[in-house]
Amino acid sequence: MNAEGFARVVRNGVGTMPGFKADRVSDSDINGMWAFLMGAPVAAAEKPAPSPKPQPTTGPEKPTVAAALQTPAPKPQVTVVAKGDEAAGGGVGQRIFEQQCNACHPGGGQGLGPAVKSIADRSTREAFNSVTREGKGMMPGFKADRLPEGDLDALWNYLKDLK
């Protein structure tokens, strides 16, 4: 997940988490939360920020929140060999993943949630269905009214071939 995706989740909510509009959480607050989560120092309101330490002149630049806001989330890469809508080029599973899953599993890799690439190599279809429907840890459940059975099938077919 990048800073832009994080801001979208805070503003719009995800799963059972409600969205927080600007009258409740400012853009500055969101940027501060992102910086904190990414390990950047966040100055306390009651203490002045310490003087910056001299930085070496060689080596890569440390990413900033502003730069992170400009960085798009990675697009998942997949070689489709599944039957059904994916093999026919329908892309339903990919669309569902991008809309429902990519914020926490960016590009199928680890983000707020664990990596889901090659999930069929480490999980059964039944376990996938159970976790997807009921949720696990911070992940909300996606009941049939939110993710119909056919969409769950398309998502499984997409994820099992995501490399």
Image (spheres, rainbow, N blue to C red):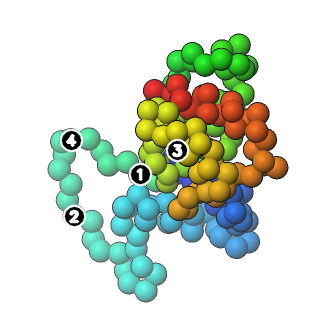
What secondary structure is found at the residue carrying circle 4? loop
Q: Residue at the far right: name it.
A: 145
Q: Which mark is residue 59?
A: 4
Q: Nearer the viewer, mark 4 or mark 3?
A: 3
- What kind of residue is marked 2? Lys
Q: Is residue 76 above or below residue 44?
A: above
Q: Which residue is mark 2?
A: 53
Chain-order first, disc 3 or disc 2:
2
**What's the residue at 44%, 62% (across, down)?**
37
Chain-order first, disc 3 or disc 1:
1
Q: Which residue is mark 1?
A: 64
- What kind of residue is marked 1? Thr
User: Do the numbered discs 3 and 1 sit on residues whose CB atoms are within 8 Å?
Assistant: no
Work out how far the residue at label 3 is from the one at label 1, CA to CA, in angstroms. Answer: 22 Å
Work out how far the residue at label 4 is from the one at label 2, CA to CA, in angstroms. Answer: 16 Å
| Number of other residues with Cα within 10 Å of mark 4, as a class: few under 14, some 14 to 19, many 20 or more | few
Q: Residue at the far top: name it.
A: 88
Work out how far the residue at label 3 is from the one at label 2, CA to CA, in angstroms. Answer: 35 Å
Q: Which residue is mark 3?
A: 105
**What's the residue at 50%, 66% (across, down)?**
32
What secondary structure is found at the residue carrying circle 3? loop
**What's the residue at 40%, 74% (across, down)?**
43
